[in-house]
Image: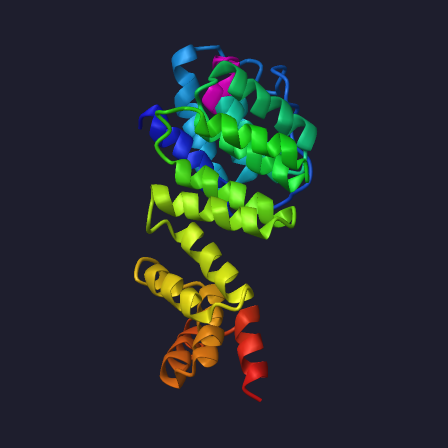
């Protein structure tokens, strides 16, 4: 697996973060201090740690990411990976230190800067988040700027800047016209601003490319009801009940049908 693929895995690892108690230290004096530093072993350990994160096996992820940093204390991948993990564990100071070190070691590592911006946004440090996102976008070789533009939009929404958010989501779609996260956000924004017809168009593009989520299906129900297409609304509702019978969105649907 090349370094680009490794960085992209970090983005995937951010979904579904879960808190859990306790973690090992962030410095290099780990319990596994008997590990013989072999620089070439850093990347395989970092990659394995990221895979464990994706599986929500945080203890194993920590062990391998720490091993990676023993093998190579200057591995941007290991620093970025362990930053994501410390964020997941709620240890924000440790997370920030490792994010900064990853960016320092690889200034053109746009995915690390993107993840750091997203992290800062969750802390409501919006100006700093924007600066990190802009750093990610400053790299002309960045292959997935749609990720960062979408994160900029989500951050703008958190800050109450709806028009700015729409601007960023449109930029994301300009880079990747069928990027599902940006399509979903534009569908939501269109619905929230009273443009049901535009919301329908975004939803149709979205559902043609991904397996619908409960939030997509519930939005589809509402949009089609507003537009008077009972058949389309019923189709969304049927999928929502069958695929996600216990979801909060299904409960909303059942309540709306009483």
Is residue 167 placed above or below 70 in the rendered structure?
below
- As drawn, the residue found furthest toward the bottom would be 258
Residue drawn at x 46%, y 75% is: 221
Residue 140 falls inside the magenta stretch: no
Residue drawn at x 64%, y 33% is: 127
User: For the magenta stretch, what is the residue range?
Assistant: 67-77
Does residue 20 appear left or right of residue 139 in this picture?
Answer: right
Asked whether residue 62 is in view, the answer is no
> Which x, y percent locates residue 219?
48, 69
Q: Quadrant of residue 138?
A: top left
Is residue 223 placed above or below 145 in the rendered structure?
below
Q: Nearer the viewer, residue 148 or 239?
A: 148
> Which x, y percent locates residue 32?
57, 19
- Which quadrant, please, contains the N terminus? top left
Q: Quadrant of residue 241?
A: bottom left
Q: Quadrant of residue 129?
A: top right
> Which x, y percent locates residue 61?
52, 33
- Which quadrant, please, contains the C terminus? bottom right
> Which x, y percent locates residue 256?
57, 82
Asked whether residue 57 is in view, the answer is yes
Is residue 95 placed above or below 237 in the rendered structure?
above
* Main secondary structure found in the magenta portion: helix
């Amino acid at each position: 697996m090349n370094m680009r693929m490794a960085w992209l895995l970090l983005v995937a690892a951010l979904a579904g973060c879960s808190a859990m108690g306790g973690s090992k230290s962030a410095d290099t004096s780990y319990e596994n201090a008997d590990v013989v530093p072999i620089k070439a072993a850093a990347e395989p350990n970092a990659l394995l740690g990221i895979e464990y994160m994706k599986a929500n096996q945080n203890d194993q992820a920590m062990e391998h990411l720490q091993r990676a940093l023993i093998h190579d204390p200057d591995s941007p991948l290991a620093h970025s990976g362990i930053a994501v993990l410390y964020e997941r564990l709620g240890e924000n100071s440790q997370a920030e230190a490792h994010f900064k070190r990853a960016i320092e070691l690889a200034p053109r590592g746009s995915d690390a800067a993107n993840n750091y911006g997203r992290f800062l946004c969750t802390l409501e440090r919006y100006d700093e988040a924007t600066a990190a996102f802009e750093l990610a976008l400053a790299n002309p070789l960045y292959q997935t700027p749609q990720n960062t533009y979408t994160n900029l939009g989500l951050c703008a929404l958190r800050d109450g800047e709806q028009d700015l958010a729409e601007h960023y989501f449109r930029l994301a779609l300009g880079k990747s016209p069928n990027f599902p996260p940006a399509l979903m956000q534009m569908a939501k924004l269109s619905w929230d601003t009273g443009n049901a017809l535009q919301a329908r168009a975004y939803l149709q593009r979205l559902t043609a490319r991904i397996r619908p989520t409960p939030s997509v299906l519930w939005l589809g129900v509402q949009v089609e009801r507003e537009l008077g297409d009972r058949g389309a609304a019923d189709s969304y509702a049927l999928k929502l009940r069958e695929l996600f019978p216990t979801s909060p969105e299904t409960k909303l649907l059942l309540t709306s049908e009483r």
